[in-house]
Amino acid sequence: MEIQIFNQNIKLGGELKKYLEEKIKKLNRFSQKIIRAQVDLSYNANHPKSQVLRLEVNLYLPKKNLRAVARAADLQTAIDNVEKKLRKQFKKYKGFKEEKRRQTAKIIRKKKSYV
């Protein structure tokens, strides 16, 4: 998986960058088919103090894109919030795929019973 990080009005230190990359790589256990992760990080002093940082993560899968956005006062909180949102989306996505497989199997069984 390729991770692209874009910064705006903020410099990302070594430890925080490593923490961010670890959290994004952890999502690889949900699906090995992640092609690319795009991370947009911006700082805007005009927002309220609790929403100064904005973190957006886009995950590109073969036929699906997952996206999560979080605003927070510090970067670690934003990273943790984005990870929770993406986990939830992955569970929904995988559940949808599993349900589709079950429905297909059910249709095939019905057709075999008619023969």
Image: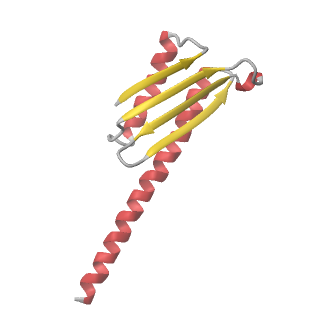
Q: Is 3 above or below relative to 31?
A: above
Q: Is 50 above or below relative to 36?
A: above
Total numbered labels placed on residues in the image: 0
Relative to 66, 44 lies left or right: right
* Residue 70, horizontal then vertical, whole percent: 62, 32
On-image quarter of the C terminus: bottom left
- Where is residue 74, by image quadrant? top right
Residue drawn at the location 44% of the way across and 58% of the way down: 96
* Residue 63, horizontal then vertical, whole percent: 38, 49
Most extreme residue toward the bottom is: 114
Relative to 95, 75 lies left or right: right
On-image quarter of the N terminus: top left
Residue drawn at the location 49% of the way across and 52% of the way down: 92
* Residue 42, horizontal then vertical, whole percent: 60, 21
Q: Is 97 above or below relative to 49?
A: below
Relative to 72, 8 lies left or right: left
Viewer-proximal residue, 15 or 67?
A: 67
* Residue 52, horizontal then vertical, whole percent: 70, 22
Residue drawn at the location 51% of the way across and 33% of the way down: 57
Relative to 15, 74 lies left or right: right
